[in-house]
Image (spheres, rainbow, N blue to C red):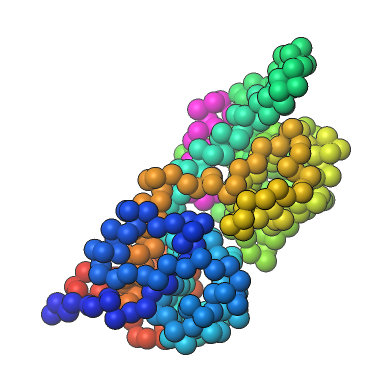
């Protein structure tokens, strides 16, 4: 029997309303389902809790939801991450309270791959150094810089992690004739995807020592926190370049600065940071060594962004929320904490008859 759900009965809070404002496409999806979330810009527990304590569901882009916030949620059923990473959400505490945490895996893989390759190309051709030299009027020096470039077809790219975005990077890099190697959690199990792409799976230290470019494609968790520390940075091939479009704290940032200043590394392309926060909502200069290096390209955590990607993530995130408020489980691969006992019972088919 078809049961229509009145989503207007639920209180839904959509965080990051100023840093990542709701566009017309996302707003149209809300109208389609008949609910109108409370739009909130709040970034500390003290600011967030008054808005979410009595909500039924939360949509979040980048704001951290630590344990103290989760503990305040009296009746919340689902925290729907409009994106992939959930390292800023206290998932364990949410699970203990029967709150589903969902995300949209794979939604930005194309964008991340394009951004990674853009970093590789710009740093391989030393665009930042030439730009700065030209700004100073040092024309001879700017031309001399290019002499020390290397053909990409002579270079090795190492991918730390071999998920969706890493595989798309491998496809793009292979088109430039690069040798591509990768590492992942279990290097002993055969990878049909790697074999198809001509990618060799190796251990992390081998990858670091052989790669001219190292690109990170792993989530941030206790196992990967400072995975690239001072010791592993020193294992990297002298003159190599580090690319990070994953999570800032995967790299020990102070050690990276040392490796760049000592010229052990030739450069870095960083879209995520451990100490620089582009989500403060306040435009003001920050004092950090990485901001003043001409062999480093920084982008403000935008590697995933595109019109197509934002539409996909809006669709997926809202689908997850609608499923739970309908009394159904979301698509299994979108459930971050599977196996929990939900606060409100869920079935495997949505109340309007569509599959959950």
At 62% from the left and 25% from the top, the residue drawn is: 152
Q: Nearer the viewer, residue 351 or 231?
A: 351
Q: Nearer the viewer, residue 259 or 8?
A: 8
| Position in image of residue 190 (x %, y %) | 53, 50
Q: Which residue is farthest top?
A: 140
Q: Quadrant of the C terminus?
A: bottom left
At 62% from the left and 58% from the top, the residue drawn is: 280
| Position in image of residue 82 (x %, y %) | 44, 61
**Left-right relation of 342 to 214:** left
Location of residue 314 with respect to 354 vertically, above or below = above
At 56% from the left and 54% from the top, the residue drawn is: 189
**Left-right relation of 223 to 263:** left
Location of residue 14 with respect to 72 vertically, above or below = above
Magenta-colored span? 161-178
Q: Nearer the viewer, residue 23 or 230?
A: 23
| Position in image of residue 307 (x %, y %) | 39, 45
At 60% from the left and 35% from the top, the residue drawn is: 119
Can I make out residue 188 in this image? Answer: no
Location of residue 202 with respect to 212 vertically, above or below = below
């Amino acid at each position: 029997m078809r049961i229509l759900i009145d989503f207007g009965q639920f209180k839904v809070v959509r965080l990051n309303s100023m840093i990542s404002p709701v566009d017309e496409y996302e707003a149209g999806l809300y109208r389609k389902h008949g609910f109108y979330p409370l739009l909130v810009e709040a970034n500390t527990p003290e600011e967030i809790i008054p808005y979410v304590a009595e909500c039924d569901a939360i949509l979040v882009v980048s704001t951290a939801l630590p344990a103290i916030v989760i503990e305040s949620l009296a009746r919340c059923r689902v925290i729907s991450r409009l994106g992939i990473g959930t390292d800023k959400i206290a998932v364990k505490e949410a699970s203990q309270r029967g709150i589903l945490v969902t995300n949209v895996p794979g939604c930005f893989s194309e964008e991340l791959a394009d951004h990674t390759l853009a970093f590789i190309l710009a740093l391989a051709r030393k665009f930042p150094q030439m730009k700065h030299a030209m700004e100073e009027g040092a024309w001879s020096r700017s031309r001399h810089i290019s002499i020390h470039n290397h053909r990409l077809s002579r270079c090795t790219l190492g991918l730390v992690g071999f998920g969706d975005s890493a595989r798309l990077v491998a496809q793009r890099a292979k088109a430039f004739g690069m040798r591509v190697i990768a590492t992942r959690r279990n290097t002993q199990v055969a990878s049909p995807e790697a074999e198809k792409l001509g990618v060799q799976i190796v251990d992390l230290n081998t990858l670091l020592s052989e790669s001219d470019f190292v690109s990170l494609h792993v989530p941030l968790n206790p196992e990967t926190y400072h995975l690239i520390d001072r010791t592993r940075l020193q294992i990297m091939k002298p003159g190599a370049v580090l690319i990070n479009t994953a999570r800032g704290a995967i790299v020990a940032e102070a050690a990276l600065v040392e490796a760049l200043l000592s010229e052990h590394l030739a450069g870095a392309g960083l879209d995520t940071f451990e100490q620089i926060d582009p989500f403060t909502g306040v435009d003001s200069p920050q004092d950090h060594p990485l901001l003043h290096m001409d062999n480093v390209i920084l982008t403000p955590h935008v590697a995933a962004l595109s019109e197509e990607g934002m539409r996909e993530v809006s669709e997926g995130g809202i689908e997850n929320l609608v499923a739970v408020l309908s009394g159904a489980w979301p698509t299994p691969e979108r459930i971050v904490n599977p196996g929990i006992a939900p606060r409100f019972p869920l079935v495997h088919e949505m109340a309007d008859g569509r599959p959950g």
